[in-house]
Amino acid sequence: MTVIYSLKNVVKERLIDGVGFRLLVPEIQISAQENIALVGHSGCGKSTLLDMLALILRPDESEEFNLHPVNGDSHDVGRLWQRDKQGKLSQIRKQHIGYVLQSGGLLPYLTVRENIELPRKLLKLPDDDSINSISRVLGIDRQLDKLPGLLSAGERQRAAFARALSHRPSILIADEPTSALDPVTAQKIMAVVMEVIRGLKITMITASHDWAHVYRMELRTLKQEAEAVDDGKIYQSRFTD
Amino acid sequence: MAQITNIIRLSFRDYSHEWRMSGCFIMALASVLAPMMILFGLKFGIVSTMVNELVENPINREIRPIGSGRYNDAWIEAYRNREDVEFIIPKTRALAATIQLKSDSARRILSTELLATAAGDPLLAGLSSLPQDYYQVVLSHSAANKLKVKTGDQIDASLSRQFQGKRERVHLVLNVIDVADATVTTRNVAFVNLDLLIASELFKDGREVSDLGWEGNSDDSMERVYPSFRLYARSIHDVENLVAALEKEGGRIKANVSEITTVKSIDQNLSVIYWIIACVGALGFSFSLGASLWANVDRKRKELSILRLVGFKSGRIVLFPVLQSCYTALLGWLLAVLVYLAFEYLINFFLAPRLNLDRALCFLLTEHFLWALALTMVIAIFAAIVGGMRAARIEPSDGLRDV
């Protein structure tokens, strides 16, 4: 399998006067079509790592941070951040990554259809039936002309998945996408999403604090370990295979 | 280009979706801008009206000598050619410039002052024709009323003199070619051609006027000298200089200098007061608008982060709040103009008549409205760019965590 993410000694710190939190990724490799779960308690750095993988958060240090999308060129993400090439990072993100936020993150002033269409419009992809088909699969085809505010929490998350997948990215990143839903709805949605991403051969990286959910979905987990360093001033969190 | 088109579409959709909030921003802007426009409209209207009243009323531009002087034709011509002189015409001695008028419709004989007139006379500016020969006259409103005549009527004019021990009287039929407006003068005046005024003086001095068949001593064709004149400055701003020039020649001059100085002083004082208020207002307006638009950008941080997440570049993201600020500026200005126009109508329709003003008390020119729009836009865009750049600099992940 092709390695799409390759990280070595990637660090992100949130310190005030030398006291605070440090996320350390000693070494991680993520292959194409793998489905990964970052598991850990709240505040352990799951979202921080996801944001770095989604190219929306600048790492403070990185010995190696490479991205090799299945259908695109390889990119030295660490170097792009160092050179502050935000336009290039934005271009890579737009083309290869879909992101689902904890609360959906739909734009409230656009209809569900317009929200889903947005990534496609930015990539100037043709108006085909893909919006309707993905909406049918996710069960929101009757909600397309409504504003997000009129949807249930479950429908909003389905719409968020539809937006993240509409432009057929090779990577889907989901930050606790079902944490605000009841277990039954969450299970239903994730079952459908897993079916879709397997069908589209997409690599999914998700964060969760629910071990049962991770085992049920048969996801490869990145374990989190924590320790106090620098005389207890820094809470250091490490994600390893 | 696709990103710019999308940003324009999205910014407008968001703006209309949040119509209540947008409406509040628009009203907040209008509530600061409209009073400033009304204030400026009043200042501009009041002062312009006063200045126009002074400029347009020739009485205020009239300069006349006190007592008798000696002014020949060359002197009159020299002043006529000055840039700051609108009109000048000689006057004869007061006693020689009186004529008796009689009409068929009125019993009384009216002793009337003769004033020479000619083309360009500001006192008779509204009239279509002026006396061209000895036989035409324009009567003042008062004289026409007393003689009960109107335009087109004929009147008998007579002059009398004591000549060689005998009392003599000559008659002349004058055609009333027009009647001056009541505002021109309240006196009984007959505006005639300069030739008739001179003829009257010659007759009274016992000289002959061959053109009219009036006998007397022959005119020894000495250079004609006038004791007085009627002069109008081109504008109120020229009066002071003209008075100074005439006084320098040794004449004692009367003009409405004090009234003009008063209006100029009022204009200056009102301008100073206005600009103090306007500067304080504009400063408040800038801070108020800037702060509200800044706050709006901050409020939009989450949504701007989502736009960056789906792939919009930072530079394009700045456009989002800038465009929304432009919508607020344009609509706020439009609302302020409507509010201003409503107040302008109320002030001019209800207040101006109470102050016996037949002119607008409050008004603005088109360029004033455009200046207000330009100022509003500049402040709005500046505030939004500063706020938008701040939002664009924030890493998208920071804004996303709150969504």
Image (spheres, grey):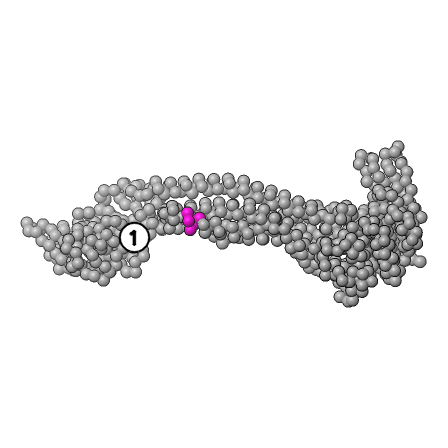
Residue A201: % across, % down: 88, 60
Type of amino acid under label 1: Leu
Q: Indicate the position of residue B186 as horizontal and vertical percent values.
A: 25, 49
Q: Secondary structure at mark 1?
A: helix
Q: In the current view of this chain or complex, which residue is farthest to the left? A: B165
- Left or right placement of residue B277 versus residue B136 in this view: right
Chain identity of mark 1: B
Say which of B346 and A30 sits in front: B346
* Residue A77 visible, this angle: no
Magenta segment includes B41 = no
Q: Nearer the viewer, residue B207 or A16?
A: A16
Look at mark 1 in the image and give the residue it sits on. B123
Instruction: Please tell me which residue is depicted at 55% across the width and 43% down the height of the picture.
Output: B282
Quadrant where the image shows the N terminus of chain B: bottom right
The residue shown at (59%, 50%) is B26
**B104 on left or right of B353:** left
Q: Position of residue B217 (x, y in %)?
A: 11, 53
Which region of the structure is painted magenta?
Answer: B347-351
Q: Is residue A161 among what the camera can see? A: yes
How many tags in the picture?
Answer: 1
Residue A16's image quarter?
top right
